[in-house]
Image (cartoon, helix red, strand yellow):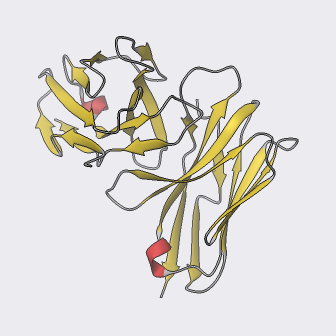
């Protein structure tokens, strides 16, 4: 099992460009999450999906959109990238939310110039 | 805003020593989890302690939870160089939605 996979690993964007970060899990988990991590900070939740077909905002949703394409896949879209979105993005999944541990992907390092 | 706050922010010890990290939080929780992050990697779950538990062990890890003080501690015994990483606590709030709230982490360096 691959666990949680993320693509791409690295990306450089110019201000105003758009892109989609992809995440997939093969553990049949119901819940999936997108976080961002900035230097010296913990993880901040951007969006999460408690089950297929549902999505909810986290702590820092502005400037992002998400799609829970199916049970396996949860994508994060930046419509018009800004330098403030320079960060490392992590996708995670769990069996059913806060009662259970989360499994993390390796991260996408995004730089917006 | 972050629910959990780890203390200290950074800790440097010698191999073989014990490492203790603390986490304080603000609101009632359902459970508290500890995660490890090696440099440049994703987080890895270490241990989960429920609000009705006071202590839990896993290998060289010992976690305590004091809900009256809203605090938890993670003890790593007989540390190894491979334990060098950042450690985060994450809280699942009572009555909250399906999410965890992470602290800013403790950066542990174990010197050989």
Question: Residue A1: image x %, image y %?
Answer: 27, 49
Q: Residue at x 38, y 44 (%)?
A: A104
Question: Residue B68: image x %, image y %?
Answer: 88, 41
The residue nearer to you, when weighing A112 against B79, is: B79
The residue nearer to you, when weighing B75 against A24, is: A24
Seen in the picture, residue B72 relative to A100 is either above or below; the reply is: below
The residue nearer to you, when weighing B62 against B9, is: B62
Question: Residue A14: image x %, image y %?
Answer: 11, 30
Position of residue A76 in the picture relative to residue A29 (left or right):
left
Q: Which residue is most to the right?
A: B68
Question: Residue A99: image x %, image y %?
Answer: 60, 34
Position of residue A35 in the picture relative to residue B16 (left or right):
left
Q: Which residue is most to the top?
A: A53
Seen in the picture, residue B43 relative to A99 is either above or below; the reply is: below
Seen in the picture, residue A105 relative to A75 is either above or below; the reply is: below
- Asked which quadrant contains residue A54, the reply is top left
Q: Which residue is drawn at 68% across and 38% down?
A: B31
Q: Which residue is drawn at 85% across and 44% down?
A: B69
Seen in the picture, residue B87 relative to B24 is either above or below; the reply is: below
Q: Which residue is drawn at 51% across and 78% down?
A: B110
Number of numbered markers = 0
């Amino acid at each position: 099992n691959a666990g949680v996979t993320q693509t791409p690993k690295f990306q450089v964007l110019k201000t105003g460009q758009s892109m989609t970060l992809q995440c997939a899990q093969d553990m049949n988990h119901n819940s999936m999450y997108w976080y961002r991590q900035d230097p010296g900070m913990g993880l901040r939740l951007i969006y999460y999906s408690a089950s297929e077909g549902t999505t909810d905002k986290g702590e820092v949703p502005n400037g992002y959109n998400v799609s829970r394409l199916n049970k396996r896949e949860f994508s994060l879209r930046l419509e018009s990238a800004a330098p403030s979105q320079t960060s490392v993005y992590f996708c995670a999944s769990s069996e059913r939310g806060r009662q259970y541990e989360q499994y993390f992907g390796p991260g996408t390092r995004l730089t917006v110039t | 805003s972050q629910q959990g706050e780890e203390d200290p922010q950074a800790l440097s010890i010698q191999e073989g020593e014990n490492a203790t990290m603390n986490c304080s939080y603000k609101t009632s929780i359902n459970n508290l989890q500890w995660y490890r992050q090696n440099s440049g990697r994703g987080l890895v779950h270490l241990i989960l302690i429920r609000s009705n538990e006071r202590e839990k062990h896993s290998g060289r890890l010992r976690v305590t939870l004091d809900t009256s003080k809203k605090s938890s501690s993670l003890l790593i015994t007989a540390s190894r160089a491979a334990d060098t990483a950042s450690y985060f606590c994450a809280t699942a709030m009572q009555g909250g939605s399906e999410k965890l709230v992470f602290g800013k982490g403790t950066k542990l360096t174990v010197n050989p």
